[in-house]
Image (cartoon, rainbow, N blue to C red):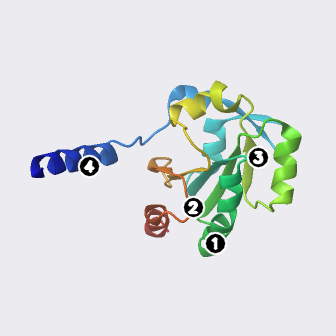
Amino acid sequence: MKRIFFIAMFLVALSVSAQKTSFSAMAKAEYMTALDGKEITFDDILAQYKGKVVLIDVWASWCSDCIKGMPDVKKLQSQFSNDKTVFLFLSLDRALDSWKNGIKKYDVQGEHYYISKGWKGSEFCKDIELDWIPRYMIIDKEGKIVYFKAIKANDEQLINYLKSLQ
């Protein structure tokens, strides 16, 4: 029994240490839509925030878990509202109007882009192995992924990474 426990712990430790630290070239080359309708690559989106900590929130206005998590996102925003941290919302809404209406309806404050290829067609979604939304990730000031996967904005590790990067 002890042997199984240690093997399991080793595998968990291995998976944690093997988290992705960068996005693939295909994910970075994917075009997303800005609120003004302009198309921009994900790489260019990230380049705008170089030197800042970026919390990525992959969400959709139709996603009940995303909406339930918004109060926790707003708590993070109040806790880390400074010129060092950017809140980047990437939407998987099914239509541009739904996305824009969702931002207004739920008063989502931050930087906004629409993943027009959708969950199944998006190289970005494939690259991050998206299996659930909301999905939170943290990018450090150098552009490295430091926290690859959280599904709750009140995730203790997520908050600890944000604190440590300030």
Residue 3 image position (x, y, % from top left): 10, 47
Do the CB atoms of the residues marked 2 and 3 lie less than 8 Å apart?
no
- The CA distance from mark 2 to mark 1 is 9 Å
Residue plotted at (81% across, 54% down): 103
Q: Quadrant of residue 82?
A: bottom right
Residue plotted at (22% across, 46% down): 8
Residue plotted at (82% across, 52% down): 102
On the picture, is 63 further left or further right than 22? right
On the picture, is 26 further left or further right than 103? left
What is the three-letter code of the residue carrying label 1? Lys
The residue that label 1 is drawn on is 75
Residue 134 image position (x, y, % from top left): 62, 50
Residue plotted at (65% across, 74% down): 78
Residue 36 image position (x, y, % from top left): 86, 43
Q: Earlier in the sequence, mark 4 or mark 3?
A: 4
- The CA distance from mark 2 to mark 3 is 18 Å
The residue that label 3 is drawn on is 62
Element marked by disc 2: loop
What is the three-letter code of the residue carrying label 3? Trp
- The CA distance from mark 4 to mark 2 is 22 Å
Q: Label 1: few (<14), some or many (≥20) within 10 Å?
A: few
What is the three-letter code of the residue carrying label 2? Ala
- The CA distance from mark 4 to mark 3 is 35 Å
Element marked by disc 4: helix
- Decide which of 64, 47 is in the foreground and name it: 64
The residue that label 4 is drawn on is 13
Q: Label 2: few (<14), some or many (≥20) within 10 Å?
A: many
Q: Quadrant of residue 80?
A: bottom right
The residue that label 2 is drawn on is 153
Do the CB atoms of the residues marked 2 and 1 lie less than 8 Å apart?
yes
Q: Earlier in the sequence, mark 4 or mark 1?
A: 4
- Decide which of 10, 143 is in the foreground and name it: 10
